[in-house]
Image: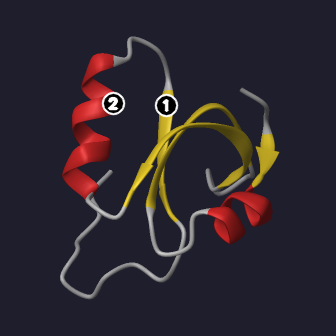
Amino acid sequence: MQREDIERIKEKHRDEWVLLSDCELDEFNEPLSGVVVAHSKDRQEIYNKQMEIKKDLCIYYTDNMPEDLAVMF
């Protein structure tokens, strides 16, 4: 798999949750690029896949966050 910039990932996986490895982050910890490991419209599928992989990963939603979702750090 190949690293892609975030704009390309957003184009390819519109309105989906994306699981990324080898993430390059900006100063606000937003992904600039990464390798797409999995993608799905179902957030739970991405969480399940994340649990299977034993390395640092990023989860990114390619559109505006759903109104019924809260994010905690």
Q: Is residue 54 left or right of residue 29?
A: left
Tell which of 10 and 22 is nearer to you.
10
**Residue type at the position of mark 1:** Leu
Q: Residue at x 70, y 70 (%)?
A: 11
Q: Residue at x 49, y 22 (%)?
A: 56
Q: Residue at x 22, y 74 (%)?
A: 69
Distance CA(mark 2)–CA(mark 1): 7 Å
* Residue 68 at x, y percent in the picture: 18, 83
**Residue type at the position of mark 2:** Gln
* Residue 4 at x, y percent in the picture: 79, 45
Check disc 1 and report the residue beneath it. 57
Q: Residue at x 47, y 75 (%)?
A: 15
- Name the disc covering residue 73, or none: none
As drawn, the residue found furthest toward the bottom would be 67
Q: Secondary structure at mark 1?
A: strand
Q: Are marks 2 and 1 in contact (CB under 8 Å)?
A: yes
Disc 1 crowd rating (10 Å Cα; few below 14, some 14-19, many 20+) is some
Check disc 2 and report the residue beneath it. 50
* Residue 41 at x, y percent in the picture: 34, 64
Q: Secondary structure at mark 2?
A: helix
Disc 2 crowd rating (10 Å Cα; few below 14, some 14-19, many 20+) is some
Q: Is residue 54 left or right of residue 11?
A: left
